[in-house]
Amino acid sequence: MLFGFAVYDVISDVTVRTECGSVSGFQKDEAYSFRGIPYASPPTGSRRWQPPEPLSPKTGNCWRGIFPAKSYGNTCFQINPDDHTTLIGSEDCLYLNVLTPSLDTNASKPVMVWIHGGSLQISSGSWPLYSPTEKLAVDTDTVYVGFNYRLHAFGFMALQVLADHSSLNTSGNYGFMDMIEVLRWVQANIRNFGGDPNQVCFVRQHYHRQNRFNCNRYRYYPNQPCHI
């Protein structure tokens, strides 16, 4: 006996080139999904409480071969929101996700860079119900970039001793620096994912008033007003 039914999650492999090498994602719900792409070196050891270190062939910190971008990267280290007596996540957490309705490099789709909420202390760029989906990318004909940034003390600890050892002579803005690095990554790579680097906008949850400085100081769409 044959049964007729609709299939919505037809999955197939796809590969896209970035400035640091190729990444392998998949097609789902008529969109293309790339998960857990590293956008900076792990901020551990000597890189803790420092600006993010971009991945670049010039510095030799890119991956080799094709990076498997089919599962989400680590959640950044944080208090477990379901049990405040435990911790979850990892310091090795600077990863981003790209959801796109097209891989045509001439598609020039608008790009929405999603900043997750959590009062700068919890959450991630991939938690269900709080992150863009493949279906949203198709329905809105827009490329979405979600990402993790350093949280709590690892992202926002401000101490003079840290400023004294900083090349920028400041401290406490590491999570914001991560967000700026994501914007740089988008400018360098998003066209290969069908996006337009001249149509990039931050989308945020309600508490992120501090993040407005990112948009005002690092304006990547000069012909448009800065709304986030």
Image: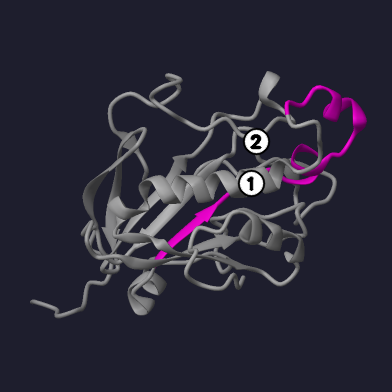
Instruction: Say whether disc 2 or disc 1 marks the residue closer to the N-terminus.
Output: 2
The front one of 28 and 177 is 177
Label pair 2/1, CB-CB below 8 angstroms: no
**Residue 10 falls in which quadrant of the image?**
bottom left
Amino acid type at mark 2:
Ser
Q: Residue 85 occupies which quadrant of the picture?
A: top right
Of the residues shown, which amino acid type is indicated by label 1?
Tyr
Q: Is residue 116 magenta?
A: no
Q: In the image as oriented, which residue stretches furthest toward the left?
A: 1
Q: Residue at x 75, y 68 (%)?
A: 207
Coordinates of residue 31 in the picture (x, y in percent) = 29, 65
Say above or below: 196 vs 158. Answer: below
Could you tell whether 42 is left or right of 14 in the image? right
Location of residue 45 with respect to 9 vertically, above or below: above
Q: Nearer the viewer, mark 2 or mark 1?
A: 1
Please state the extent of the stretch shown in magenta in the rendering: 143-167
The 10 Å Cα crowd at callout 1, few under 14, some 14 to 19, many 20 or more, is many
What x and y, as percent, mark residue 175? 70, 45
Q: Is residue 50 visible?
A: yes
Gap in Å between the C-alphas at discs 2 and 1?
Answer: 11 Å
The secondary element bearing badge 1 is classed as: loop
For label 2, count other residues whose C-alpha is less than 10 Å away and answer few (under 14), some (14-19) or many (20+). Answer: some
Left or right of residue 54, residue 13 in this image: left
Callout 2: helix, strand or loop?
loop
